[in-house]
Amino acid sequence: MKEVTAAIILKDNKVLIAQRAAGDKLAGKWEFPGGKIEPGETPRECLKREIREELEVEIKVLDFFGESIYAYHSGTIQLMVFWCAWISGEFTLKVHSNLAWVNRHELDLYDFAPADIPLVEKLKAVININHTLVIETIERGKNMNLIQVNQEKCIRCGLCADVCPTEFITMSEQGPQTTEASCIACGHCVAVCPVEALDNVKAPLAQQLPLEKIPVLDAETAAHFLRARRSIRCYKQDAVPREKILQLLDIARMAPTGGNTQGVAYHVIDNADTLRKITSVIIDWMEEQIEKGSSWATYFATSVNKYRQTGHDVILRGAPCLIVAITAKNFLPRGRDNTHFSLAYSELYAPAIDLGTCWAGFFEACATSGYQQLIDLLGLPEKMAVTGGLMVGYPQFSYKRLVDRNPLQVTWL
């Protein structure tokens, strides 16, 4: 996966966009300017260099805005976008065919490259009630403009301050105020407001859905639902539409994460030949572990022998799809914890769209060991690490009873 950066450069409440030149694979498409990260570069260093080379201006790279992962025919890219301030220089066309400064409404008039589209939608939401970009916060590094309060609506109830986990918001006689603490973009302050009086640049009101009443299952139904989740190891060979996989992962991104850090991306493999190669490579790794006298040798031997003798897929169980969770290596171990939360959401949601799942334990063990043959097969960037794997497909069988587990063990203090 190729790592690419892009800049949101602001001027007079407008954002700079650039059009790909003729001869480019995406000729005519518009994008936020930037480019590919070179070996040894940080994303911020890359962005400053690319903007200097492409536009002949100097910028200051500010806060991280967001990222998009998109699979083009030529390969998958991870597009990391930052708020940026224009420092000096005159904008010059070096590699693009055109530049434009556009406001929120004009963004819809341009045909953007597919990887940029989710970020365009996010940018459109980062608009205050007067339809102007809240630029001061980013340029000055202050907290004061991260929230906007409609003073006519605000009833001074203080709920936004009460639910803020970092005490970023406090209450005064004038209403909600910000402090020097960090905002983790959890969105609680906006979601709890009973009169829609508060907005937050990092968690815009426009991206939240109204909720009349929190849907709650009765205790017995909830218990049966959770107990009915099964690890599916027998799948129909029907392909899973990518729309369903995206639906599944869209729920995964809603999972709670430590400090709302999130940071989990997904590499989805639904090519049957690639899946077979993954199984074969992991079997090779298992045999190497057996030869080395690994503590897992006895456990691995059974699976290896069955595969060698029958060809039965004991690794991915014939699943037509494998979801590979990845995070930045410098985000470990939290990235792995966040992955477990996220994939658990996917597993619980899957039956609602007729899918079954199973944690790919052998796959994760091989990947986290750093087995190069598997890493090469996955084609991941050097700075990214595998943090989990989930088999996905249509279950071949249905289960008729709820199974039991070990007795509950509890100690009270």
Image (spheres, rainbow, N blue to C red):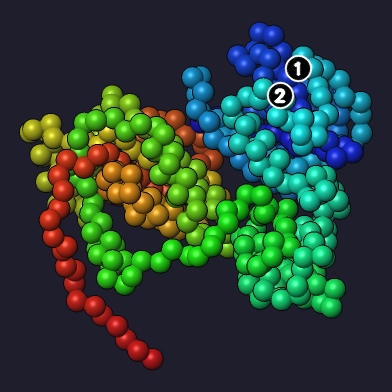
- Relative placement, left or right, of 21 versus 69 is right
Check if mark 2's residue and mark 1's residue have beta carbons within 8 Å.
Answer: no
> Can residue 71 be seen here?
yes
Which SS class for mark 2? Answer: loop
At horizontal 28% and vertical 26% (from top left) the residue drawn is 272
Residue 337: x percent and y percent? 45, 58
> Can residue 167 be seen here?
no
Disc 2 marks which amino acid?
Tyr
Q: Which of marks 2 and 1 is nearer the N terminus?
A: 1
Image quadrant of residue 261?
bottom right
Residue 299: x percent and y percent? 16, 52
* For residue 337, above or below residue 27: below
Residue 369: x percent and y percent? 36, 46
At horizontal 86% and vertical 51% (from top left) the residue drawn is 136
Q: Which quadrant holds the C terminus?
A: bottom left
Within 10 Å of disc 2 (Cα), the crowding (few <14, some 14-19, many 20+) is: some
At horizontal 62% and vertical 67% (from top left) the residue drawn is 192
Checking the image for residue 383, the label placed there is: none
Residue 9: x percent and y percent? 80, 36
Disc 1 marks which amino acid?
His
* For residue 143, above or below residue 33: below
* For residue 271, above or below residue 360: above
Q: Which residue lies furthest to the top in this view?
A: 23
* Residue under numbered circle 1: 96
Within 10 Å of disc 1 (Cα), the crowding (few <14, some 14-19, many 20+) is: many
- Relative placement, left or right, of 406 versus 153 is left
* Residue under numbered circle 2: 110
- Relative placement, left or right, of 91 versus 120 is right
